[in-house]
Amino acid sequence: MAKLRSLLLFTLLASLSTVLAESWKVNNINIQVVSKDGAKKAEHKLEYPYAIQDLSAEPTDSLKLSFKLENSVRPHQAMVVFQSQDEFQDEVMVAASVKGSGKGRLELNFARGDTKFKYGTRKYSMTFLLGGPKVDEPYKYTLGHIEVKGPSVNPPTRPTRVEYKSQPEIHHQFRPDQKLINQAISGAFTILVLTPFAALFILWGQLGIKFEPLKALATKPLDLIAALVFFGSLAGIEYVFYSYWTHVTLFPVLQYLGVLSLVAVISGRSVLSTAQTRRLQRTAGSAKKEF
Amino acid sequence: MRPSILLSTLALALVAQATSLTGNRALVLLDNLDDTDSYMELWNDFQSRDYNVTIRETSSPIALSRYDQREFDHLIFLSPKMKEYPKGMSAKAVVGFVADGGNVLLAASPELSSTLRELSREFDVEFDNRFTTVLDHFNYDDNLGNKQHDVIAVNPKTHMAKINAIVPQDAVSGPVLFRGMAHSVNPTNSLLTSVLWAPQEAYSWESVNLEEIADQDPNVSGKDISFVSVLQARNNARVAFLGSTEMLTDKFFNAKAKKHGEAETVSGNRKFIEELTKWTFREKGVLEVVAVEHHKVGELEAPAHYRIKDNMTYTIHLAEYHDGEWHPFSADDVQLELIMLDPYVRKTLDQIALTEESTVGSFSTTVQLPDQYGVFKFMVNYKRPGLGYVESVTTVGIHPFRHDQYPRFISQAKPYYTSAASMGVGLLIFSFVYLWGGLDSSAKTTKKA
């Protein structure tokens, strides 16, 4: 009977211990922010599930967490994980030490802590994690948020990597076209260039040109042909110059010029000789008059 | 026309080979040949993909290359305890194997030796100390990890890289089970990518003596712990690092994963490893430049050289390899760069619409060449996560204007044109008036007062 009783007691105790060991019981959670010289800047008692929101720390401050574990089983993990609340979501896990009595404390000096705290002023969420191999249900308590300021002098930079993705388009800026002067100015100067012609025609008009030899040409067909050929060859030479300026290259131009100049020389001789006879007649006539 | 000819020759060259582009000779190194039995499903999977698998113990000598040619195409390390390399192999030989185009898969365990740790350092991967394992009291598997909380069920939807080229998001249906050692990848290395990482509550600690509390900050924790990471070298050879050999065993392939607090499902290990090995052994995610064409707008052939401010049409044909054959590649972010020391122009290429007969994906654009003359490179530098690297360089010369290619007639130069023309016209008018104007025949030329 006694054996049965002890057996019953044993199984009862065993089942009780498993029931007890299934979850963690944490009390007296106390969080403090302590400055470099030990002065307490903030102190809060936390009770699950209350989360503290307005904690802030300087880069030289320390965060102190203390708690009391009511379980007889010792945990393996008693840590606080800090997660930055920006787009990088960096994580830092800091361990607490738990004594045999169940009293646990965690001290994190931000100046000597992980480099991730020093990248800049960021807000972190703090989550208290408690777990062990013998207990099935772990304990998670989001303690709240803390803003940790980055160091003002020489903050370390976050390591970056070249991301393989499409890069921004580059459009080439072409050099602007050469700036040219106003069209009106070139128009004005074109007219200026043509003014000597006006002067020439005015002066010729004053001299009184009558085109007598031209009328006389009509009667002498040989001279007419020579005159036409000569004038035509001169006009042709001018046209060859114009076509050289627009599109013809040098060697064809030289060929044309060679032919045309020959024609001009041959016909020009007779035209110029008639002009010379006219001039001699005039001077001979005036010499006669003088005398 | 031309790209299809090139592609068909490429396809013919591959018809006789296995599905992997590198080749089908795989070498597996085990600590002990008795371990072969625990990976039977893995060997079956390799057999079905036409691999010629050679299984050796690390104590037997093996040569990775002979007469400067690779003897094997894929090297699989399932021997974490390996203290010394097999005779004929060394760290230098393995790195040379990768430089030669061979692919490597390295699986570790908490008993990882320093030789393999040194080998991983060559690739910028840092494994944790010996006899450490990853522990997670929040995400452990109830069936296998009940005792020590060291088997972690990883949710592929949240803790797997969203790179569809490596492991597609919808391919892995259940959690991936992991028991092994943590490693971290260098965050600045662009060639390295972490594919599977630990949940926030995980940490790496000694695997022995779990009675004592972990009272120091763990070396790595949370998402800094990488479970599986991959590296694609610049020559497109691929190396995969797994922190657990057990991930590949039959036990984990067939396990019913029950994450603590959730319902029971089949583990996603088999599909995950299948997709990972397909990627690592270059059976998918491989890109190839089939042809490149460039010519002036309106012409068909590439000229000997270009002239500044010419309009040029550039076309590149890309193909992607997966499921055993080449398919046309589709993307909307292939870019062309015109580079002479620095990029002068960078433009996104438009894809020509694919038809049923397309064998390659064609990307084309028209660009006006810059007004800087010199020797330029037309470069398509296409590197995306999970896909093979494409670097296509065409060197062309861009010449300045010839003397007769400048603007010919300038309207502001009218005074000069007019003055030259007036010379010629004036000659004609003057000679007409002089010859037949009667100035030298009139009796009125001499006047007497």
Image (cartoon, rainbow, N blue to C red):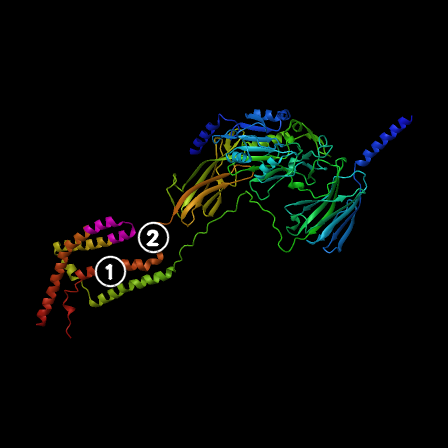
Q: State the SS at label 1.
A: helix
Q: Is residue A249 magenta?
A: yes
What residue type is disc 2 on?
Answer: Arg
Residue A246 falls left or right of residue A161:
left
Q: Name the disc covering residue A256, or none.
A: none
Which one is in front, A5 or B323? A5
- Tell me if I can see residue B187 in this picture: yes
Q: Amino acid at mark 1?
A: Gly
Residue A193, position as x, y percentages in the image:
30, 62
Crowdedness of circle 2 by 10 Å Cα count: few (<14), some, many (20+)? few
Disc 1 crowd, CA 10 A, few/some/many (<14, 14-19, 20+): some
**B222 on left or right of B299:** right
Judged by its main secondary structure, the magenta piece is helix
- Find residue A161 and report its horizontal and vertical position in percent: 57, 45
Circle 1 residue: B426
> Could you tell me residue A243's position as x and y percent?
27, 51
Q: Does the segment drawn in magenta span residue B385?
A: no
Image: magenta residue range: A240-258
Q: Label 2 marks which chain's residue? A: B
Residue A70 position (above or below residue A267): above
- x, y (%) of residue A72? 81, 38
Q: Which residue is mark 2?
A: B408
Using the rendered view, name the quadrant where residue A163 is placed: top right
What's the chain of the residue with tag 1? Answer: B
